[in-house]
Amino acid sequence: MVDDGMVLLSDTRTNAGLDNISTYKKMFTFEDPGKRIIVILTAGSLSVTQTVLAKLEEATESGPENKNSVFGPGTTLQVAEMIGALLSEVSVNFRAKLNGMAQSASASLIVAGQSVGGKQRLFLIYPEGNFIEATSDTPFLQIGEHKYGKPILDRVIQRNTTLQDARKAALLSMDSTLRSNLSVGMPLDLAIIKNNEFSFKEQTRIEAGDPEFLAMSEAWSEALRDSFTSIPISNDPS
């Protein structure tokens, strides 16, 4: 989340063991043009996240008066609180069913968006329903398998980073994760929201073999190799 807007990016791979890898959407969008825009990213148990999103989508379709509609609460913060409560409720129900089988299921969500009259907000919601919010000091949040892609975000992303550079950093961060973790895979879903516009500046799916993504990945690899080679060593054994 930068001053100019927000960049959201997710992969689509789910992993239930080496022989059970599937493709499932992990980004879900809700848009009331001119009034509110919400993006939800998911990680963790597919059964939990699909149940939460099915309930949200059904409630939202039934009208803003439904307590679980993303268009019902007055602010984006209240939307995050409602989604957190729903995630907690679903997680508790699943735990109760799985305890007897010595299994567990948990999930976490990122909720991003803006409501008319309010500022853009970015939340990470934990399985228990509590959450943290992105701030000026930490303007990005991650869930799932993200440790390989975190360093570039730590070094690059600030609140005054341009939206185009934030897009580039998100894609290169994901590229690093794709190269180092087989549980993350293409295609990718990308959404960009400009501050105070309440609509998508960009919303696309990036397929495997996408020429722009491949060119960016290779350029990044070359830049890293060149920078690595050019760094002087103070105690060169040669």
Image (cartoon, rainbow, N blue to C red):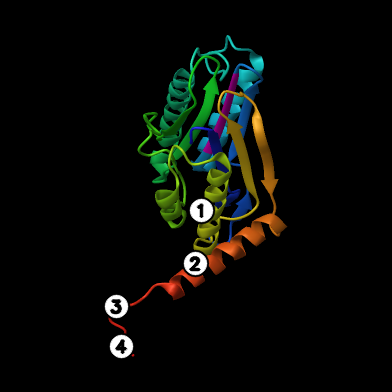
Q: CA distance from mark 4 to mark 2?
A: 23 Å
Residue 32 on image: x %, y %: 64, 19
The residue positioned 64% from the left and 17% from the top of the image is 34
Q: CA distance from mark 2 to mark 1?
A: 13 Å
* Dot 2 crowding, Cα within 10 Å, few <14, some 14–19, many 20+: few
Q: Secondary structure at mark 3?
A: loop
Q: Is residue 211 within the magenta segment?
A: no
Q: Amino acid at mark 2?
A: Leu
Q: CA distance from mark 3 to mark 2?
A: 20 Å
Q: Secondary structure at mark 2?
A: helix
Relative side of 86 to 191, left or right? left
- Residue 136: name its quadrant: top left
Residue 228 on image: x %, y %: 44, 71
Residue position marked by numbered label 4 in the rendering = 237
Q: Which residues are magenta?
A: 36-41
Question: Which mark identifies residue 173?
Answer: 1
Question: Tags 4 and 2 in contact by the CB under 8 Å rule?
Answer: no
Residue 8 on image: x %, y %: 56, 39
Q: Secondary structure at mark 4?
A: loop
Question: Tags 2 and 1 in contact by the CB under 8 Å rule?
Answer: no
Question: Which mark identifies residue 234?
Answer: 3
Q: CA distance from mark 3 to mark 1?
A: 30 Å
Q: Amino acid at mark 4?
A: Pro
Q: CA distance from mark 1 to mark 4?
A: 34 Å
